[in-house]
Image (cartoon, rainbow, N blue to C red):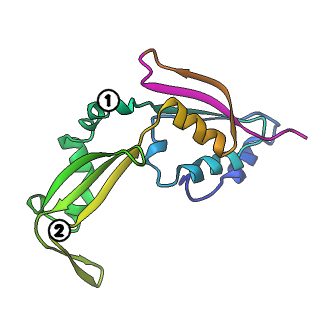
Amino acid sequence: MDFELGQFSDLMYELKKDDSINLMLFLGSTLGNHSDLSRVLTNFRDSMTSKDYLILGVELTNFVKVHNLLSHYDNEYAKNFATYTLSQLGVKDGEYKYDVSWNDKVNQVEIRALLNQPVKIEIADEKFTLQKNENILLARSIKFTEYTITKLLSDVGFRTELLTTSEDRGYLLTMIQPTRYSA
């Protein structure tokens, strides 16, 4: 299911026929990989009743020690995954530099292909050339602190029922509910 596409209240309705309370899990730190975090969370919220719960898990990042996490994205496995589409388009490994960096403005890791020569691309009947020194954003992963994730959840209309972090404060687990009142 594409969480950015829209709400899924029709699926949730089927689960509530017996007046049960739904408990949804969104774990694995994948929230930061979506292009519109607010939309994803709003879709969850709009698909829930005020009695339902969502347990969300995200990796926490100490923005002062960002350099420690870049190596998770700068290895052969991550490179093969991030550059797969380029290879399918016929872009060869030597035609670009694989670059992993931190964007302070939006608190995210960014993976780019920095072209070191012109590259011809053909998609369907369209042909075009990407020029030397152009860069292609291949992947990004938004990172959170305890403050940034709880603010985001509050801003989209969730209230926190329970929040805990791992002992090393590297992972946050929170149980949230829509900020609505039962009639």
Above or below, 108 against 160 in this view is below
The residue sitting at 52% across, 54% down in the picture is 36
Helix, strand or loop under label 2: loop
Task: Give the x, y percent position of residue 183.
Answer: 91, 41
The residue indicated by pointer 1 is 65
Give the amino acid at mark 2. Answer: Gly
Extreme-right residue of the structure = 183
Residue 90 image label: 2
Q: Is residue 133 above or below residue 73?
A: below
Is residue 6 shown in magenta?
Answer: no
Q: Position of residue 92 (x, y in %)?
A: 12, 63
Report the front residue among 2 and 144.
144
Please provide the residue range marked out in magenta. 168-183
Q: Is residue 173 magenta?
A: yes
Please tell me in which quadrant of the rendered image residue 108 appears.
Answer: top left
Dot 2, how many residues are within 10 Å of its Cα: few (below 14), some (14-19), or many (20+)? few
Residue 89, x across and y down, in percent: 22, 68
Image quarter for residue 112?
A: bottom left
Label 2 vs label 1: CA separation? 36 Å
Query: Can residue 165 be seen by looking at this rendering?
Result: yes
